[in-house]
Amino acid sequence: MKDFPFNAFPGLLRETIFDIEDVTQAPPELIASAVLSALSLGCQSLINVKINDTIVSPVSLYSFVIAESGERKTTVDKLVFKPFHEHDLRVLLQYEELQKEHERSSKIWHKKENALLKCVDKATIKGKCTDEFSRQLKALYAEKPEPPKARRFIYNNTTPEALQFAMYTHSPQTGLITDEGANILNRQTMADFGFINPMWDGGDFQVERKTTPSFTLRNGRITLLVMVQKAIFDGYLKRQGESARGSGFFARCFVLYIDENLSTQGQRLIRRQSSLQSGNLKYLNCFYQRMNELVEKSVSQHGTGHQTCLSFEPPAQEAWERIYNKIERRLGPDGDYENLKDFASKILNNTARVAALLSYVTEGECAIKKEYVENAWLLCEWYMQQAITLFGNEEDYYEALLLSWLRREYSRSWKNVVRYNDIRNAGPNVLRKGKLLDRVIDRLEKEEVIDIDYSKYGARKVYKGRHFDNNPFTKHAAYQHY
């Protein structure tokens, strides 16, 4: 896989990632994913992006980071989302005081209401006019104390019902951010795709209830970032994987797996003086300043239900259309995205969202330039390669695809051998790059479907194994590809 495209981030964001890396020694790819989520959380209530004449999209991002214990997930969470955590703490402390005052005011209000209603009852019994009491009741209802609102940016341990009601009563734009993914994945929140998917799409959501009043959640937005260990994520896949993939939930997500190639464990040597100790974190502090500006603006616009719509400049629109055509070609036979059409269908929208976020955080309310579209595509393409690694090999797809190609080549040549380099050069396109082919070859050899031998010059050769014509992979639909 290609290296993560850190240069796709504008200077401040890129250097912020490196500042946090210097402090935490966490994988920079993990930090980058958290930073993107922070941009989404700060901007989702402020802007939308106009993709073309018919599509206006939210900018909210959904992300999974799969990383084992020790990868500094909690530390990164605290550093990246510090402005939001600090705001939420202030809000909750204020909310507790306001709630106490609301309870006192409500008791007094209800006593006034009861007194007037008793007067209405007495007057009605005596046959007297109740117009004056009705007028007083109308004025009283206009003065009914409103419950206070707690405009929280982050929830990390909640049920779908609780989250929906909180978004209805407090703020329709919020975040599900957790460095302990079990808090969310082991509850129903990530199983309610009828709710979580529409929140990515934006718009209204009707909540029907049996025992309490129903309500409509208007202009809802959620930024999702779940950092979770591999075993917990695998358990979630066993329980909900088919539904999550079939509903399009995973296709909406950026998924990052911190494997042995990306992990920094074993490389974290103690240094005499880090940037944190020396106070040399100017980029991180500038990032905090920008995030605080977004927080303040989001709070000031709370309840307006209005987002500024950012459009592409003409060259940026042309760049986006070129990306569209590139993706379309990759969906064809032997294309990189042939087995991930669901992910590919959402990657264009995610590209527009990331472009809008990079542009707005850097330049404010202006048309999106071409460079932001191209840089957003570099980031989204990298995450697409992660998706191919994690999801593209479901149900033995690549093994069956390679066997289909080998069967055809053996038949054409009347020989039961193919050179490994021929697979690299002319085999299924999706297997020609990176380490995926080696993993597929190793698995097929282990299952005795193929045999590997070497020529006297060291060239690797792939022969038919004793189970070549009778193995589980031949039952996969991809085996009929060639």
Image: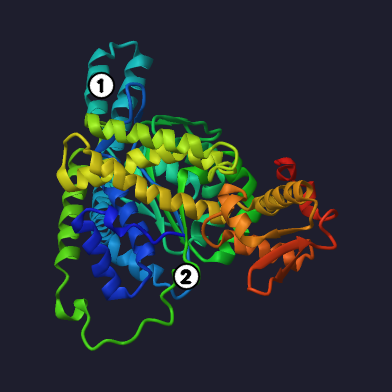
Q: Amino acid at mark 2?
A: Asn
Find out whether the residues at labels 2 and 1 contact each other: C-beta distance under 8 Å.
no
* Residue displayed at 25% across by 47% down: 358
Instruction: Specify the amino acid type for callout 1.
Output: Lys
- Can residue 143 be seen in the rendering of this structure? no
Query: What is the x, y in percent for residue 86?
Result: 24, 60
How many neighbours does mark 2 have within 10 angstroms: few (below 14), some (14-19), or many (20 or more)?
A: few
Classify residue 208 as left or right of residue 326: right
Taking the spot 20% from the left edge, 77% from the top edge, the residue there is 275
According to the image, label 2 marks what residue? 261
Residue 367 vertical position relative to residue 170 in the rendered view, above or below: above
Question: Is 371 in front, or is 143?
Answer: 371
- Secondary structure of the residue carrying tag 2 is loop
Q: Position of residue 260 (x, y in %)?
A: 50, 72
Name the front one of labels 2 and 1.
2
Q: Along the line of sight, which residue is nearer the eye, 168 or 323?
A: 323
Question: Is 383 or 25 nearer to us in this picture?
Answer: 383
| Quarter-of-image position of residue 339 | top right
Looking at the image, can residue 456 be seen? yes
Q: Earlier in the sequence, mark 2 or mark 1?
A: 1
How far apart, in angstroms, are the residues tagged by discs 2 and 1? 68 Å
Residue at 15% in and 57% down: 289
Residue at the location (70% across, 48% down)? Answer: 405
- Give the image location of residue 164, x and y in percent: 44, 41
Q: Which residue is mark 1?
A: 138
Count of labels in the image: 2
